[in-house]
Amino acid sequence: MKILIVGAGIVGNNLARELSKEGHDISVVDSCLDRIRPIADTLDVLTVQGNACQPSTLKRAGIEGMDMVCAVTEKDEVNLYVCFLAFKFNVKHRFARLRSMEFTGPEQIFTPEELYVEQAVNPGEIIIETILKILETPGAVNVAEFAQGQILLRQFEVPENAPLAGKKISDTSDMDSILIVAIVREGKLFLPNPDDEIRPGDRIYTLVDKDFLPFLLPMLNKTVDRVEKIILYGANQVSINLARKLEEITSDVSIIEPDREKAMEAADVLHKTVVHQGSGTDMDLFNDINMHDADFFMSLSDDDENNILAALLAKKNGAKRALVITNDPHYLPILDSIGMDITINPRLITVSAILKHLRSSRVVSVFKLMENAEVVEVLVDADSNISGKLISAIKFPPDARIGALLREGEMILPNSETRIEPGDSVVIVSLSHAVEQIDKLFGKKNRFFSF
């Protein structure tokens, strides 16, 4: 498939890498030479430097023969105009990253389709949804849902005194509807074997039936503590919309914003949230707002470094848990190593959302765990090579696992004697280099990544 990616920033770069590895014919357009050059030097893709709002630039990138355009620049208006031009060039599939809630939220005046966008991805909306789900699960540091919310993916850090600490994966085989599918240790993710031991400090990814989640929490020494006081850093659109949601579930929400004008604008639109004008390093302000009583501190500004510093200082001053938004992927392993509770990377969120729509109709969900790993939910067709086979008869790549099945509304933890049936929702955990092998397992007629 021929795909044009407009925007060679973090999201565009990552999309180009993912899709070129999957065998697609990729072209990338960006106005900045410093962004284009690394892609041209490392990937077998066509790169064009120029203004994507000019039809001539898009023609140089081959838009007239494209099957799809993904507009992922940092400006909504550019992404919208690119999709309009793509429509004029008869490109069938048009995707846009849109950050403004005015284009994707409940108060939108025009739908994305009316603006020539086939599919809009708003990372801010996904971030808010993710944070709310984290608040619903005590101790969770990452969340996702599959099979229409019946199968939950939850990531937890293993405390020193947790009942699971020191156990082998094989020792957990008797846990009903709970499966440990991946472990992050010292910043590196691996898919565990039965003899691998769960160690204190590990971050484990678990697949769990939603009805069994309460049974998992005691194994990690997690209790359901009410979150009452939440402090947000940064008065941007994401934090303001999150504050509106939080006002519905807790009575004590506040925002710290360094810029006086932004602080006043936030105070004008928020009715229950208290907005403080000040920096994320102001210890006097931390004392005034009783940071030591905070159940959650969330750094949501657009500045990675300020987010990290503010969260660290909030933790030092007594905040029970801290969440950090970081756009730079290089910070992720560093934040894990310094003990940050939760990190959210908008780039991984955006790429996951776009990949979900780029792959075949049988791929229901895609969730990026880290740079080199993902979880995919696939609906099994009757004509798939995997349909009707016992798992023991399937030559699955060593770096990919079938984590769970949903059949007739029931979650099944598969074993070697489990047979894959048409209509099953299969949740697969895979390292990135094994994705192509998984593709082949699902047949030649309707390929895993076909369009």
Image: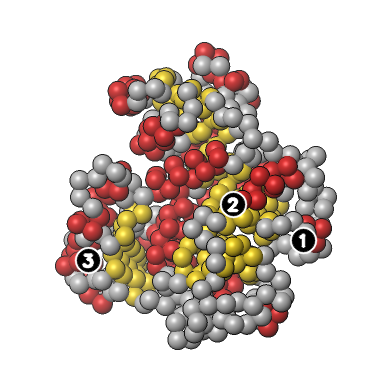
Lateral position of residue 238 relative to residue 230, left or right: left
Lateral position of residue 354 relative to residue 431, left or right: left
Q: Earlier in the sequence, mark 2 or mark 3?
A: 3
- Residue 270: mark: none
Residue 281 or 230: which is nearer the viewer?
A: 230
* Residue at image mark 1: 173
Instruction: Give residue 386's position: percent from left, percent from top.
Output: 57, 81
Q: Distance between the residues labelled 2 and 1?
A: 18 Å
Give the answer, above or below, for where 306 lies relative to 84: above
Instruction: Give residue 151's position: percent from left, percent from top.
Output: 57, 57
Quadrant of residue 441 within the rendered picture: bottom right
Lateral position of residue 185 relative to residue 299, left or right: right
Residue reaching furthest front? Answer: 408
Proximity of marks 2 and 3: CB atoms separated by less than 8 Å: no
Residue 72 or 417: which is nearer the viewer?
A: 417
Q: How far apart are marks 1 and 3 (CA)?
A: 51 Å
Quadrant of residue 70 within the rendered picture: bottom left
Disc 3 marks a residue whose amino acid type is Ala
Q: How far apart are marks 2 and 3 (CA)?
A: 42 Å
Q: Is residue 180 visible?
A: no
Residue at the image point whose x is 51% and y is 33% from the top: 298
Q: What element carries label 2?
A: helix
* Residue at image mark 3: 86
Residue at the image point whose x is 65% and y is 69% from the top: 401
Instruction: Give residue 3's position: percent from left, percent from top.
Output: 34, 71
Q: Is mark 1 on a helix, strand or loop?
A: loop
Give the answer, above or below, for where 24 lies relative to 106: below
Which mark's residue is nearer the viewer, 1 or 3?
Answer: 1
* Residue at image mark 2: 210
Q: Within 10 Å of the Cα at label 2, are there few (<14), some (14-19), or many (20+) other Cα atoms?
A: some
Q: Is residue 402 visible?
A: yes
